[in-house]
Each structure stands twice: as C-alpha cells, then as structure tokens.
Image (spheres, grey):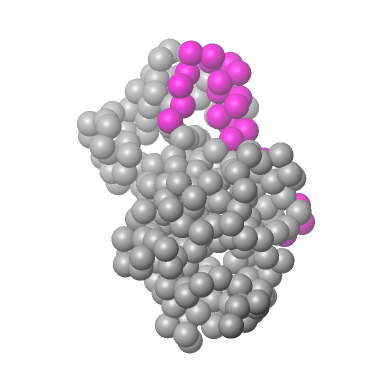
Amino acid sequence: MFGPLGGVVSDLDGVVYRGEEPIPASVEAFLRWRRLGVPYAFVTNNSTLSPDSFARKLSRFGVEATPEQVFSSLAATVALMKQRWPRGARVFAIGEAPLLAAIEEAGFALTPTEPDIVTLGYDGALTYEKLRRAVRGALAGAAVIATNPDPLTPTHDGYDPCVGVLVAAICAAAPNARPIVVGKPEPLMIEQALAWLGTPRAQTIMIGDQIATDILAGQRAGLRSILLAGDSPLNAGAAARPDGIVASLLDLFAQPRGRT
Ligand SMILES: [Mg+2]
C-alpha cells in the first residue's frame, strides 16, 4: 500500500504486544520483514525495562531482536540527565527498579529528600508517599524530568494510568514546575533508531498506536507514520493525522493497487 519499504521503526506497547500478550498479526509482520531483509528497530516510551529485557520479551513472543535494536525512554532520560547535570546530583525518582538502577549507574545519588532533580517514570507500585516526595521536590525548585508524556498505557484488558498522569499531578500541585518530557513525540529516539537502521527517511516508516506520541514523533523525524488502529481512547481528539491507518500490520504487505 506504500512505496518501496527500506526500514521500519515501531512502537512496542499496543503494536507488538499488549502487556504480556503478543499481537499475533504484528509478530507475523516482523517475521516477514526479517525474511525479506527489511531492518527494524523499536522505540518505546515504556521506562520499566532495560533494552536487554525488551529484547528478551520480544524473542519470547517470536520477534527476533537484539538490545541494540530497542531505544527506550529509560535510556534517553538518563542520557539527558547526564548531559545536563553533574555526577553526584541528587535525584528523587518515581519509577521501577531498572530506571532507578540506571540513574544510580549514571552516577546520580538517589535521595528521598532535597533532590536537585525529580525524575518521573512509570511505577506500578506508586504510592501517595512517592507522589508527596515528588511534589515537595518540585515545590522546592527541583528540576522535573519525565520519561514520557503518555496519560495511558495499553494492557491486555484495557488502559492503565501512565506517566502523563504524574506530570499532570506535579503541575497541578507545583504550577511553577516546567517538566522536561523525554520520549515520543520528541523525535530523539526515532533519530537514534534511524541512525541504527541506516535507511533513508523516505523509505522508512514509523508504526504506532498513539497519534499524539508515535505518529507525531515519526512525522517530526520526517517518516511516513502508520497508525495501527485500535481502541485507544486518546486518538479521537488527536491533532496530528497519520499518513496511513491499518487494522493489522499484515495490511502493510498488501499489493499496491491502481498503478500500472
Ligand atoms: Mg504504544
């Protein structure tokens, strides 16, 4: 349905799988691309797993991938923190173990009080106490950095609140906070994926299930952006328009029509 395809940049949650359940047509599509020699890379706003863990999860679902093929908001966030703050800066982070470990490995000091930086990532064990510490840090003037802006994340049985909800909470409580939000729709991870793929932008597509993050990021990076249509409650009111919409990634293998 599109011109010659050189490479694929794809979102993970909601495209390749939902939570712990693979999406079979998508798995089949990546198998075909692999057979056809079309290189692919993944860009995810999910900050709960390391690239190794994402690669293992993909392999478990039947999609061959190496850690080098996965670009995550976890790595992008920690890289940005390293660029802007010195080693030893004090960080209060809401997030799961891999994010906290990466922050410490980068030379920052995790602290419950008086942080220089408040880092917000997805945390399935979020508590009022964590939110309170983040708000206190923001009120005291700490920089606020969030792994991604998504208000919702898809799971096998619906949608769960995501990091955008935390960002909104901090902004409500500390109106002077100016959060730096990493992840899509910022095109940084798409650029990283393109550099890894080495394919021309005009022949590379971005696939995602969220218009406000995936599609916008792809378009900002100059890629044709394909929406995998689903039940996302957020897409109806989104401002950007995908370049193509498919119900299944296998639709991308359909023969072009109307041209001879
Ligand atoms: Mg998604």
Residue 147 picture location, percent across and down = 47, 41
Question: Which residue sits at x=54%, y=83%?
Answer: 32
Residues shaded magenta: 156-180
Figure disc tally:
0
Quadrant of res 207: bottom right
Q: Which quadrant: the C terminus?
A: bottom right
User: Which residue, as the protein is rendered here, is positioned at the far left?
Assistant: 86
> Residue 136 location in percent, x, y?
50, 17
Q: Quadrant of residue 127?
A: top right
Residue at position x 67%, y 65% in the image: 246
Query: From this viewpoint, is residue 227 visible?
Result: yes
Residue 72 horizontal side relative to residue 13, left or right? left
Residue in the picture at 48% in, 86% down = 35
For the N terminus, the quadrant is bottom right
Look at the image and tell me whether residue 115 can be seen. Answer: no
In the depicted structure, whether residue 153 falls above or below residue 200: above
* Residue 171 vertical placement versus 100 (above, below): above
Q: Is residue 176 magenta?
A: yes
Which percent across, then down, holds residue 150?
A: 59, 41
**In front of the other: 38 or 119:** 38
Q: Does the magenta portion include 209?
A: no
Residue at the front extreme, as displayed: 260
Task: Give the percent coordinates (x, y) of residue 172.
Answer: 60, 18
Q: Nearer the viewer, residue 195 or 5?
A: 5
| Of residues 93 and 72, the one drawn nearer to the viewer in this rendering | 72
